[in-house]
Image (spheres, rainbow, N blue to C red):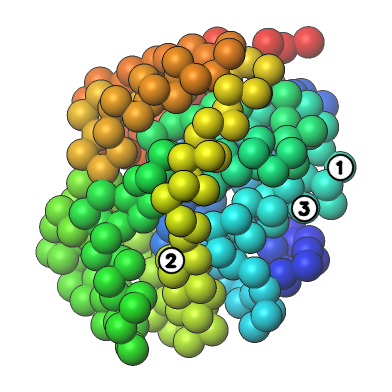
Amino acid sequence: MTEVTLSAGVVEYGDTGGDGPVVVLLHGVAMDGSLWRHVVPGLRSDFRCVVPMLPLGAHRRPMRPDADLTVLGVAHLVAEFLDALDLRDVTLVMSDWGGAQALVAEGRDQRIGRLVITSCEAFDNFPPGLPGRNLYTAAKLPGGLRLAFALLRLRPMRRLPLTWGWMSKRPVPHDVMDAWFRPLWTSAAIRRDLRAYVLGVPPRDELLAWAEALRTFDRPALVVWAAEDKVMPLAHGRRLTDMLPQGELVEIADSFTLIPEDQPQRLCEAVRSFVPLP
């Protein structure tokens, strides 16, 4: 892992290097870049894959106490990350976390050449579905996040619908999930960061405005959605495709939200077909 100092704090990231087209892969809440561990090997021979560890709960370096870690604040941090690394004509890939859609609405998308939107938050589905509502409730209660993630030390709890059971059809390996949750188990500052994010969802009108702004994105966009998603409705993927002027839709069978876990090969193929090589 390499690191870069941004306005909110130190952000770690993985970077395969190389001269190929740049693909930046974004993970969701309470997970880290290892979400892409089955996808990056299928891309790195031809693409430069950059995987930042966003401050969404699995990060190991707490952000500054005064950092803006609302949904919009983290989206701005993504734009700042692209600036800091001087990444250009980026293919931005988002999974689970949909906040990067705000970059278009905020006019912070100049470095983005292509969008790949896999099953993620959209429209007013923030926080998303049953797991998101459960997390939001925990964040509102004193000590709620500590208790919620302490319960996830019990492995059977991880496959319940209100935790991770609806996020992937195939269980994420326990050692991977242990690494995701360990910062939340051990650091009050990391729990503080996650709480700021979970409670920092803007009003419904603003969320819908972010989606509406995608009509102005005049570059290629690929929507890759899990056909059996129980958290991010398939109808949202189809609506996003219709809104994007150059939108294409690929529906992935036999997968829940975390397509990089359930169908990484299919996702690799979709990205490779979408991003032209020099």
Q: How many labels, in total?
A: 3
Task: Point out residue 113 in the picture as x, y percentages from the top left corner.
Answer: 72, 24
- Residue at x-position 43% and y-position 66%: 198
Dividing the picture into quarters, in which one does residue 73 lie? bottom right
* Of residues 46 and 131, the one drawn nearer to the viewer in this rendering: 131
The image shows residue 216, relative to residue 193, as above or below, that is above
Mark 2 and mark 1 residues within 8 Å of each other at the beta carbon: no
Residue shown at 30% from the left, 83% from the top: 141
Q: Nearer the viewer, residue 197 or 17?
A: 197
Q: Which residue is drawn at 40% across and 15% down?
A: 250
**Labelled pair 3, 2 in contact (Cβ < 8 Å):** no
Mark 3, residue position: 80
Q: Locate residue 29 relative to residue 262 in the image: left or right.
A: right
Q: Nearer the viewer, mark 1 or mark 3?
A: 3
Check disc 1: other Cα within 10 Å, few if <14, some if 14-19, many if 20+.
few
Amino acid type at mark 2:
Val
Identity, as a three-letter code, of the amino acid under mark 3: Glu
Residue named by callout 1: 86
Q: Residue 125: x, y in percent?
A: 35, 46
Q: Where residue 20 sits: x, y (%)?
A: 76, 24
- Earlier-in-chain disc, 3 versus 2: 3
Mark 2: few, some, or many residues within 10 Å (few <14, many ≥20)? many
Q: Name the residue under label 2.
A: 198
